[in-house]
Structure formats: C-alpha cells, structure tokens
Image: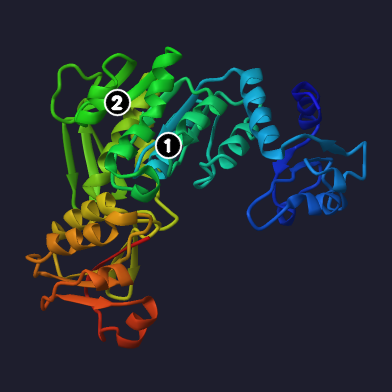
C-alpha cells in the first residue's frame, strides 16, 4: 500500500497505538513484531476494541479488506508514515540526544517554549525507533514546535532517527560513559551521538551548543550554531553569569535570578540550554524564569522527597559512570549527615568492573558520608573501608540493612 493511502487512513484516526491493551476508539493500531511477540495475532482484537484501522504485515491475519492495511513491514510503515506526517506539517522540530539529562532537558525546553507556543514533546522517554515515530505522529495541525528526544545504544541509531525526524535544530546534552557495551567505549559514544551533528551540517540546520564542552565546541565549528557559556566566553550568544547549587540549582543571567527545583550542579546545563532555546525563539525573560521555576522533576529524576526526618534525593531512573560521579560530587558538597545508597551500573560491557572500581576509589576519602553499594558489580570491586558497605543484591541489603536512619540527607542512585 502506498504511503499516501496509509496517510489518508491515518488522518481519519484520533490516535496511533502499538499495544492492544491501550486501544481507544477511532485509533490506528500498528502491529509490530519483536523477538518474543507478533502483534499481527491481535489485529482482529484491536478492531473489536474500537480501532478504526490496523496496519499488519502478515497475510495470515488479513481478514478484513476494509479495516486492515497490509504492508511489507509494519515497523517501516510506522517510520515512513511518521516522516510523511512530519513533512506535511512542516513545523520546526528540535531534536536532542546525549548520554545524560535528555529527558530533563526535553521537559525544560518544553515548559519554556510552551509559554509562547503550542508545543508537543516526547512523552516520558519514548525515544527509540518506535517511540520517535509515535511522537511525530502525535503532532497536530495547530502545533507550533515539537521537541523530540532521541536515545541510542549503538552506532547509526541517531542517524536513522534523524532521517525519520528531519530536525531543524539539534542539541547534544553531553558525551558520557553510557551504553559503553553497545557503542564500543567512550570514543564510540562520541561518534554515535555526533551523528546528529552530521545530519545538521549536511542539511544546513542549526545546533544549540554549550561552548564550555570542548567536544561540542570542536564538532560544531562548521555548523550553524547558537551557543551558551558559563565561562564568560565572549563568542557565546548567551552568557550565564553565575551558578549555585545548595542543593537546588540557582542561575543568574542578564540580571535575572532563576531558582529551580532541580538538585545538583550537573543539572545547570539542562537549564542553560532551555534559557538559550527560549531566547532564540523570542520567549520573554520573565516567561523563561517562570517556566523554569515552576518545573518540578518527576519519574525518579533528581527528586527531593522528605520522609520522616530524612531528606531523600531520588535520582534512580538510571545510572552510568558519568552521571554517578556527578551525583556523588554534588552530594558531598551538601551540609549535614549524609548516606548514599548506590546500585550497579548496567550496559558497560568489558569496562564494567573497571568503572565500578573507579567509583569506589573516588569516595575512599569521603569519610563524612556512609556509602552503601548494592549489586554484584560493586561487590566484586569492593575496597574495604569503615564508611563503605557492600551488598550483593537488594535482597541482601534488606536482610542486613542498617537500623535507625534518622536526620540524614540520603542519595539513591543506580540503574
């Protein structure tokens, strides 16, 4: 079936769905295949639940020529449909990727731009080869700007997502030690994430760039770019005058003070790029300030929770060596009695034990903090110190956990 025909069917539907458990009336169901499932089997069920059309790629389940749209490959149809829709609307799209901070940055950009524009942003972290097309297909005719998060753990994934999305703007949060196994080390991470820069350069688009990041600065020298700096770099479009974090990030620029609800100096650049993008799109300084100050983090990302007499910094959505080191560095600067519960970091491949040991070595002299490492990787890398404790698993920790944790600031982080 031609993409133009699929698109006309899509336009008759209210939503797009790939899970029959979430079918709503008048939706388009796309039957995808995975290693352990074949959603073609549920095509008729989707129609029974109210789907207006279903896209399938298995003739065996083609039982309704009016409602079933047979294609060669359902995933490819989803991606092509998303790209076609994106081009029919022609609105500006901001894409972002990076090792750490993608989702928080995306949310900050969205709240800032939504002060002036009707925006759509990736829901949660639906940032892969399925989530990105679904985000694009959620864009409405009256949407002014879309913000699309892109995740990857192998080479060529960002390249593919950019070809589907065709972004007008791009931002890479950082290049850290995430998904080392899939990328093949830190150099592989840099190469894989930089596929976004390659797209932007090839298509004469614009990158938002942190000039204080030497990798970003070097790789975007020949790309259209809009820049920010906290080091008083006179070449920057936006200069951030001052940053504090005790524990919440406070930023000053252009005589304006912004007090955020985000914990940790590592969140400052997430705020800085939101300021920069807001400024680029002519959002007023007061609206930028209000949007950032009203943003409350969720989903286990830099959340501050008060329970009893304890203050808990919950940053447990995910962890890699870069984000773990940043969280510990910020945590040690806080006042008061402190305890850190740190879980294993995943997807590090051959570097796993080395990176876990580096984290342990980095806190050997932080004797004012009690550290509790949980997981086989940390346990296998252990170095004995009085203020450091090790558990092979969460179950091991529960059976042997310390008693009477009161009046502490507590950090919880892990994969």
- Examine the image and state in which quarter residue 347 appears: bottom left
Classify mark 2: residues with Cα within 10 Å, few (<14), some (14-19) or many (20+).
Answer: many
Residue 154, percent from left and from top = 43, 41
Horizontal side, residue 366 vs residue 375: left or right: left
Residue 2, percent from left and from top = 78, 23
Q: In the drawing, what numbered circle is on residue 261?
A: none
Q: Is residue 174 visible?
A: no
Q: Nearer the viewer, residue 153 or 243?
A: 153
Name which residue lies at 45% across and 30% down. 95
Mark before the other along the chain sequence, 2 or 1: 1
Residue wearing tag 1 = 155
- Examine the image and state in which quarter residue 70 appears: top right
Q: Is residue 64 visible?
A: yes
Q: How many marks?
A: 2
Task: Tell me the element at label 2.
Answer: strand
Between marks 2 and 1, how big is the CA–CA gap?
22 Å
Q: How is the image coloured?
A: rainbow
Name which residue lies at 70% across and 33% down. 77
Q: Nearer the viewer, residue 173 or 375?
A: 375
Name which residue lies at 14% across and 72% down. 383
| Depicted 4 relative to depicted 256: above or below | above
Name the mark nearer the viewer: 2 or 1.
1
Task: Tell me the element at label 1.
Answer: loop
Residue wearing tag 2 = 209
Could you tell me which quadrant the C terminus lies in?
Answer: bottom left
- Tags 2 and 1 touching, CB below 8 Å: no
| Depicted 359 relative to depicted 135: above or below | below
| Depicted 368 relative to depicted 118: above or below | below
Residue 278, percent from left and from top = 38, 26
Residue 179, percent from left and from top = 37, 48
Could you tell me which quadrant the N terminus lies in?
Answer: top right
Classify mark 1: residues with Cα within 10 Å, few (<14), some (14-19) or many (20+).
Answer: some
């Amino acid at each position: 079936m031609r993409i133009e025909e699929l698109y006309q069917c899509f336009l008759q539907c209210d939503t797009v769905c790939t899970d029959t458990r979430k079918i709503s009336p008048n939706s388009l169901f796309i039957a995808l295949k995975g290693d352990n499932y074949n959603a073609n089997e549920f095509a008729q069920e989707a129609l029974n639940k109210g789907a207006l059309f279903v896209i399938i790629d298995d003739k065996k389940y083609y039982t309704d020529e009016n409602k079933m749209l047979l294609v060669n490959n359902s995933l490819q149809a989803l991606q092509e449909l998303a790209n076609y829709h994106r081009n029919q609307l022609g609105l500006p799209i901001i894409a972002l990727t990076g090792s750490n901070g993608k989702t928080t940055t995306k949310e900050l950009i969205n709240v800032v731009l939504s002060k002036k524009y009707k925006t759509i942003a990736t829901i949660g972290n639906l940032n892969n080869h399925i989530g990105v097309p679904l985000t694009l297909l959620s864009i409405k005719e009256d949407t002014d700007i879309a913000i699309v998060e892109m995740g990857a753990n192998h080479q060529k994934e960002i390249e593919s997502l950019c070809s589907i999305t065709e972004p007008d703007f791009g931002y890479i949060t950082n290049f850290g030690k995430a998904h080392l196994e899939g990328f093949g080390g830190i150099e592989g991470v840099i190469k894989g994430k930089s596929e976004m820069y390659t797209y932007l350069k090839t298509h004469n688009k614009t990158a938002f760039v942190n000039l204080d990041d030497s990798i970003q600065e070097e790789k975007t020298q020949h790309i259209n770019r809009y820049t920010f700096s906290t080091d008083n770099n006179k070449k920057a479009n936006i200069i951030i005058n001052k940053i504090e974090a005790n524990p919440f990030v406070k930023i000053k620029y252009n005589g304006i003070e912004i007090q955020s609800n985000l914990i940790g100096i590592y969140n400052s650049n997430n705020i800085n790029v939101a300021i920069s993008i807001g400024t680029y799109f002519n959002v007023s300084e007061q609206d930028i300030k209000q949007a950032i100050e009203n943003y409350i983090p969720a989903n286990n990302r830099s959340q501050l929770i008060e329970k009893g007499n304890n203050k808990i910094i919950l940053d447990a959505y995910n962890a890699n060596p870069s984000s773990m080191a940043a969280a510990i560095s910020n945590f040690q600067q806080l006042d008061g009695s402190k305890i850190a519960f740190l879980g294993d970091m995943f997807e590090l491949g051959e570097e796993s034990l080395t990176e876990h040991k580096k984290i342990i070595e980095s806190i050997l002299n932080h004797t004012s903090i009690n550290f509790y490492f949980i997981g086989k990787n940390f346990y296998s890398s252990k170095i004995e110190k009085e203020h450091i404790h090790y558990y092979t698993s969460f179950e091991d920790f529960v059976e042997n956990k310390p008693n009477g944790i009161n009046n502490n600031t507590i950090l919880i982080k892990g994969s």
